[in-house]
Image: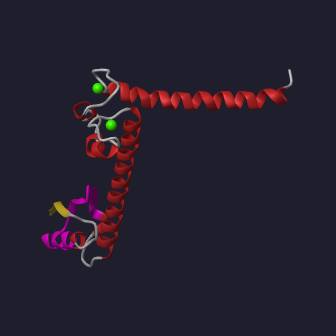
Amino acid sequence: MNTKFLTPLLISFFALNASAQEAKTTTAGFAKLDTNKDGFLSRAEAAKEKGLSAVFKEADQNKDGKLDEDEYLKGHSMHQRAEATEYAGDGAVTTKVKAALLAAEGVPSTKISVETVNGVVTLSGSVDSKDEIAKAVKAAKAVGGVKSVKNLLKAG
Ligand SMILES: [Ca+2]
Ligand SMILES: [Ca+2]
């Protein structure tokens, strides 16, 4: 057999197979949410997928108050994207807070752990004095994108 002709055939076969597989997985997500099997997702059905409710109205393009499969796929990628953006935001805030602590005078930045969830920064760890805690909190609060600072730092 001439492999020169067989190889591209095989490649296209696998490519087709892979995309069919992907479509099947997303459709399975829709089928799982559509508990009454009417081919649409009501608000209550959509609520079972985390983040989908928030984009429901936007995803419901024909404004019939329910999502068909295409609308679901659109909504699904919308909230996936929104979550990814939010996550990057928190990561950036953590980086900026760490830099601010490092730059702040009288703050033992290496002893402080920084965590950010939806813009809320949590500082934890043990430092030497209450003065250091106050300075660390002040420096963190001054960082852009920080909604509030939760202080779990201990002195002693
Ligand atoms: Ca349904
Ligand atoms: Ca709709």
Region rendered in magenta: 111-138
Depth check, front residue: 97 or 9: 9
Residue 117, magenta (yes or no): yes
Q: Is residue 138 left or right of residue 82?
A: left
Depth check, front residue: 52 or 63: 63
Residue 31: image location, x then y, percent: 36, 25
Q: Is residue 74 left or right of residue 117?
A: right
Occupied quadrant, residue 151: bottom left
Residue name at image x 32 percent, y 58 percent: 90
Say which quadrant the N terminus sits in.
top right
Residue 123: image location, x then y, percent: 22, 60
Q: Is residue 5 left or right of residue 18?
A: right
Residue name at image x 38 percent, y 38 percent: 71
Q: Please, is residue 121 above or below residue 27 in the view?
A: below
Residue 119, magenta (yes or no): yes
Toward the bottom, the furthest residue is 105
Q: Is residue 72 left or right of residue 107?
A: right
Residue name at image x 86 percent, y 25 percent: 2
Number of marks in the rendered image: 0
Residue name at image x 26 percent, y 45 percent: 54
